[in-house]
Amino acid sequence: MIRVEGLGVTLGGSEILTGVDLTVSAGEWVTVIGPNGAGKSTLLRAVGGRLAHRGSISLNGTHVSALSRRELARTVAVVAQTPVVPPGMTVIDYVLLGRTPHISPLGRESARDLAVVDGVLDRLDLAPFVGRLLATLSGGERQRVFLARALAQEAPVLLLDEPTSALDIGHQQDVLDLVDDLRRDRDLTVLATMHDLSVAGEYADRLVLVAGGRVVATGPPAEVLTEELLTTQYRARVKVLKGAHGPIVVPVRS
């Protein structure tokens, strides 16, 4: 479970988030949406223990500031928009980094660690790339590698910051279906950010609309993805259609 109470974040002298309250239950998928600059990525970075903040953030009942780096890595896995990639690293070595929290400081990967990584690589269609350098992959291929490392951590909380931004529609579906399957199988708690509102509504149990650093709406996709709210908060002309799982948001030309 993720619990955020009265979250405030200031960066470079600017107030990015103010008074944000958010709860994500175990096994729930919540996606944060909002216009550019709303504070979505900042919210995920704070929840992941990567930003100084005001207010309270707890993961599975423990305040994030009370967790050691190793404990934090065992609790929460993060897929950032632009992860730092060490130069000269191969796909297999990068994904194996996800097992680091489970390996003793002087130990090495066990058979189970290798099996977990092999399974994730297969599910994400990455097995043919294991010996390739990350620098030689396309943006979409690297995006899947970043997700593979996070899933290899087997943490109960998964934070996804625009996880499908570089993927074609087929791999978008593959990645999100995999996350959804793992969430159900492992009772995984998922907190994501997405720009594609239709995709967000298709997969999330709840949406949280953030604008100006504050939560302005929260609820099931059908209650948040309304023409009135989207027109007001995004200053966009849209048509919202009823879909099989969630609303479909279509931009409309003037």
Image: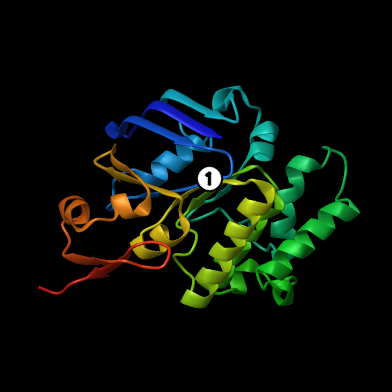
**Looking at the picture, how far across and down is residue 27, in whole percent?**
58, 44
Q: Quadrant of the C terminus?
A: bottom left
Q: Is residue 243 above or below residue 157?
A: below
Q: Secondary structure at mark 1?
A: loop
Q: Quadrant of the N terminus?
A: top right
Q: Is residue 253 above or below residue 159?
A: below
- Of residue 123 and residue 102, the one placed in the foreground of this image is 123
> In the picture, residue 90 is in which quadrant?
bottom right
**Looking at the picture, how far across and down is residue 231, in whole percent?**
17, 56
Q: Identify the residue shown where x is 17% and y is 61%.
A: 236
Categorize mark 1 by other alpha carbons within 10 Å: few (<14), some (14-19), many (20+).
many
Q: Is residue 241 left or right of residue 126?
A: left
- The residue singled out by tag 1 in the image is 28
**Looking at the picture, how far across and down is residue 99, in whole percent?**
75, 49
Q: Is residue 64 above or below residue 244?
A: above
Q: Identify the residue shown where x is 75% and y is 45%.
A: 100
| Total count of labels | 1
Q: Identify the residue shown where x is 52% and y is 34%.
A: 2
- Of residue 109 and residue 226, the one placed in the foreground of this image is 226
- Of residue 164 and residue 11, the one placed in the foreground of this image is 164
Q: Which residue type does callout 1 highlight?
A: Glu
Q: Is residue 90 visible?
A: no
Q: Is residue 192 visible?
A: yes
> In the picture, residue 114 is in which quadrant?
bottom right
Farthest residue, direction left: 254
Q: Identify the residue shown where x is 71% and y is 53%.
A: 152
Q: Is residue 166 left or right of residue 76?
A: left
Q: Is residue 187 left or right of residue 202?
A: right
**Looking at the picture, how far across and down is residue 97, in whole percent?**
72, 51
